[in-house]
Amino acid sequence: MIAIIVGTHGMFSEELIKSSEMIFGIQENIGYVTFKPGEGTDDLVNKYNTLLGELDCTDGVLFMVDLFGGSPFNAASMIAMKNNNIEIISGVNLPMLLETFGSRSFSTLSELVKVAENSGKDSIRPLIKMIAKSEEDEL
């Protein structure tokens, strides 16, 4: 099964995994890294490498980070650029993580990146437009 590492600014990654497991159940082969004030990219690289040593990375690793170009992304990029079996997706959110959990047992790494990307985008919906569309459908 593809390993997942969630890396974010602050405690968001830890809480995101806790929230997703409330909904989807406890997950295996997953970890998180928090980026705290005063830390730098080297600290993140070290945290990521520690997790990589603890997880089963045989089927690949998907880094899910909060911001494209942010420190968690940059540190993951340093590792991914040296390994063909590691991918990164930014903009991690709860629906994206849930869809990824549901698909990782039967998806390749590249397929899982697409699942994450599509579910992340598809989960963004404005309430006002949904109400207006619903009213139009009733007419």
Image: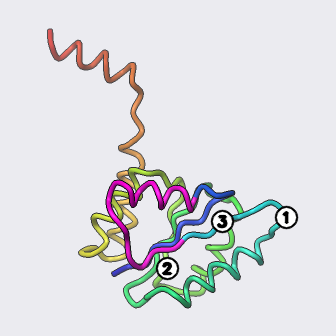
- Residue 62 is one of the magenta-drawn residues: no
Residue designated by label 3: 34
Image position, residue 126 (x, y; %)? 41, 27
- In the picture, the disc for residue 118 is none
Residue designated by label 1: 38
Residues marked 1 and 3 touching at CB (< 8 Å): no
> Alpha-carbon neighbours of circle 1 within 10 Å: few (<14), some, or many (≥20)?
few
- In the picture, the disc for residue 86 is 2
Residues marked 3 and 2 touching at CB (< 8 Å): no
Q: Which of 117 and 18 is in front in this view?
A: 18
> On the rendered image, what quadrant is the N terminus found in?
bottom left
> On the rendered image, what quadrant is the C terminus found in?
top left
The disc labelled 1 sits on which kind of residue?
Answer: Gly
Image position, residue 39 (x, y; %)? 81, 68
Span of residues in magenta: 13-31
The image quarter in which residue 36 lies:
bottom right
Identify the element where label 1 is drawn.
loop
Taking 78 as reference, is 116 above or below it?
above
